[in-house]
Image: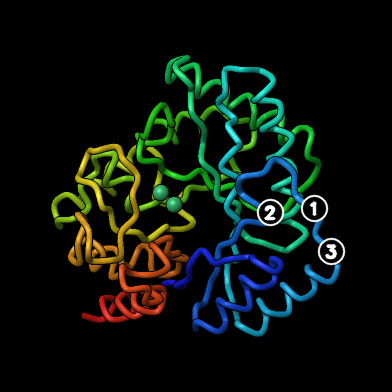
Amino acid sequence: MPFFGAHLSTVGGVQNAALSAGELGFSTVQLFTKNNNQWKGKPLTDEQIQQFQRFVQKGKLKFPTAHDSYLINLGSPVEQNRQRSIEAFIDEIHRADQLGLSYLVMHPGAHMDAGESQGLKQIVASFDQILQECGAFQVKILLETSAGQGTSLGYRFEHLAAILAGVKHPEKFGVCVDTCHIFAAGYDISSPEGYHKTFEEFDRLVGLDRICLFHINDSKKPLGSRVDRHEHLGEGTIGKQGFQLLLRDSRFSNLPMILETPKTNSEGKPMDPVNHARMKRWLKG
Ligand SMILES: [Zn+2]
Ligand SMILES: [Zn+2]
């Protein structure tokens, strides 16, 4: 059975994401280890770290995961911004290791009109610099598939393959597949034919064994729109059938699947429990 979880709030401290995950009955969790719209975060305190790890144990949470800051762009053609991103990403790695996290999910980057191949080259160079400057670390870096909004890279499986083939230490990397993003990018996982074709293609280009985690989100926008808007499971353009295919796919049955769907519906009702219940139900029938 997959490990179900959600991206949860760290208001009041990182430990609160792990606490909430346990309270919601999840078996995994994703969090920002610092404010995702700021370059620098306060260092984590020993007390926060200990409390976080206690809640992870108490909730029996597996594969706790960080998501990197939205400001980081390892593909930036502006050298100053790229160096700032490298520095911030090294800090993300250190924070993830302090908390004992399994994975650090990251957006590969945007080429900002420098062109896709140039952007991919910059990302590879940035990772090589990061691994050289960072020292030894445990957390695995997961390249997230993107929707292809603006000039963001990672919306084609070929992009992920190019990064993994380019970096000096590919063993430090895995992939996070976001269902909303790949669908918006044009991979039709809503039907059995499309679903199987998509993962065949992924396997051929990247390798299914690279997938460490899923972001399980429905999409508000149509197939191939390249617009990233998450919807509650079964209420968007992917629909129930696509998620049933994924949830019952034995190749992915031991992986974390993390919700990044809106926290409430239009009436203000908390929706993580509703989406969680759907995952558990659709897994069975
Ligand atoms: Zn995602
Ligand atoms: Zn998204």
Residue type, label 3? Thr
| Residues under numbered marks 1 and 2 in contact, where contact means CB atoms less than 8 Å apart | yes
- Residue 128 x, y percent position in the rendering: 67, 29
State how far apart marks 1 and 2 are (Cα): 8 Å
Vertical order, 194 against 157 (above or below): below
Residue shown at the point (58%, 27%) measured from the top left: 124
Residue type, label 1? Lys
Picture quarter with the C terminus: bottom left
Q: Which residue is mark 3?
A: 45
Element class at badge 1: loop
Q: Is residue 12 visible?
A: yes
Q: Which residue is mark 1?
A: 42
Mark 3 and mark 2 lie on one chain; the one further toward the N terminus is 2
Vertical order, 165 against 94 (above or below): above
Residue type, label 2? Lys
Q: Is residue 202 rendered to the left or right of residue 134? A: left
State how far apart marks 3 and 2 are (Cα): 12 Å
Mark carried by residue 223: none
- Residue 257 x, y percent position in the rendering: 43, 65
The front one of 63 and 208 is 63
Residue shown at the point (52%, 77%) measured from the top left: 27
- Residue 100 x, y percent position in the rendering: 72, 63
The front one of 115 and 135 is 115
Element class at badge 2: loop
Q: Residues within 10 Å of mark 1 (few under 14, many from 20)?
A: few
Picture quarter with the N terminus: bottom left
Q: Which residue is mark 2?
A: 34
Mark 1 and mark 2 lie on one chain; the one further toward the N terminus is 2
Q: Residue furthest front?
A: 267
Q: Is residue 193 rendered to the left or right of residue 106? A: left
